[in-house]
């Protein structure tokens, strides 16, 4: 009788252990969608950084000072890029971001009309930042980025141009 009771208790403990292991959370286990979410999070972060930097500089530089406006935009975004790169290392996500000159130049060509009927002045892509002349002032329109997101499962590389104005 005692032996039978011991077997019943042992089986109950085994069942409890199996249930515990199935419900347990492990921080190092990821689903496939986490990598895509991490890339979307990084892109959203860069959009906010671009918007904040351009908003702070609106109307601060004349068109002849556009190179200084680009430098200041990059200087304001660079610390945010460093913050992004350190943001999720503990959870196994590593970001690398850099300015993309080619993507910015292509965006300016595609999105800035030229010719006599345009509403605003010319656009210039400089060091990954697109600026436009508006009323003798420099307005930051967009910034091109290369974003790399690395997790333990994969590496996602994307190029994005984030508009600074809506």
Image (cartoon, rainbow, N blue to C red):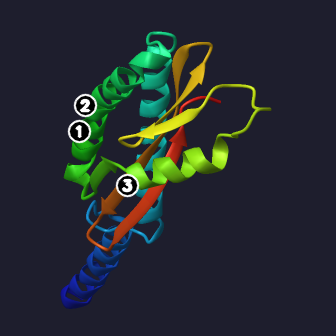
How far apart in space, not on screen, are marks 3 and 2 (Cα)? Answer: 16 Å
Q: What number is the disc on residue 146? A: 3
Vertical order, 8 against 166 (above or below): below
Extreme residue toward the top, this view: 60
Viewer-proximal residue, 26 or 76? Answer: 76
Vertical order, 124 against 155 (above or below): above
Q: Where does the image place residue 78, in percent across and percent down from the top left?
A: 27, 34
Q: Earlier in the sequence, mark 1 or mark 3?
A: 1
Instruction: Look at discs 3 and 2 and give the one toward the viewer.
Output: 3
Q: What element does badge 1 sit on?
A: helix
Q: Where does the image place residue 18, in percent across and percent down from the top left?
A: 32, 77
Q: Where does the image place residue 140, in percent across and percent down from the top left?
A: 50, 27
Q: Are marks 2 and 1 in contact (CB under 8 Å)?
A: yes
The residue under label 1 is: 82
Q: What element does badge 3 sit on?
A: strand
Q: How busy is the neighbourhood of tag 2: few (under 14 within 10 Å), some, or many (20 plus)?
A: few
Q: How busy is the neighbourhood of tag 1: few (under 14 within 10 Å), some, or many (20 plus)?
A: few
How far apart in space, not on screen, are marks 1 and 3 (Cα)? Answer: 14 Å
């Amino acid at each position: 009788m005692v032996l039978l009771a011991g077997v019943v208790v042992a089986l109950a403990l085994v069942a409890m252990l199996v249930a515990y292991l199935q419900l347990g959370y492990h921080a190092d286990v990821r689903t496939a969608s986490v990598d895509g979410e991490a890339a979307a999070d990084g892109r959203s972060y860069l959009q906010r950084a671009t918007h904040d930097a351009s908003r702070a500089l609106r109307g601060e530089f004349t068109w002849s000072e556009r190179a200084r406006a680009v430098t200041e935009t990059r200087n304001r975004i660079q610390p945010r890029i460093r913050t992004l790169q350190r943001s999720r290392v503990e959870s196994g996500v590593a970001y690398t971001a850099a300015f993309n000159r080619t993507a910015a130049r292509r965006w300016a060509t595609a999105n800035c009309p030229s010719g006599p009927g345009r509403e605003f002045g010319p656009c210039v892509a400089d060091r990954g930042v697109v600026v436009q002349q508006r009323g003798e002032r420099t307005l930051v329109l967009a910034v091109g980025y290369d974003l790399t997101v690395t997790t333990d499962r994969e590496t996602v590389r994307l190029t994005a141009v984030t508009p600074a104005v809506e």
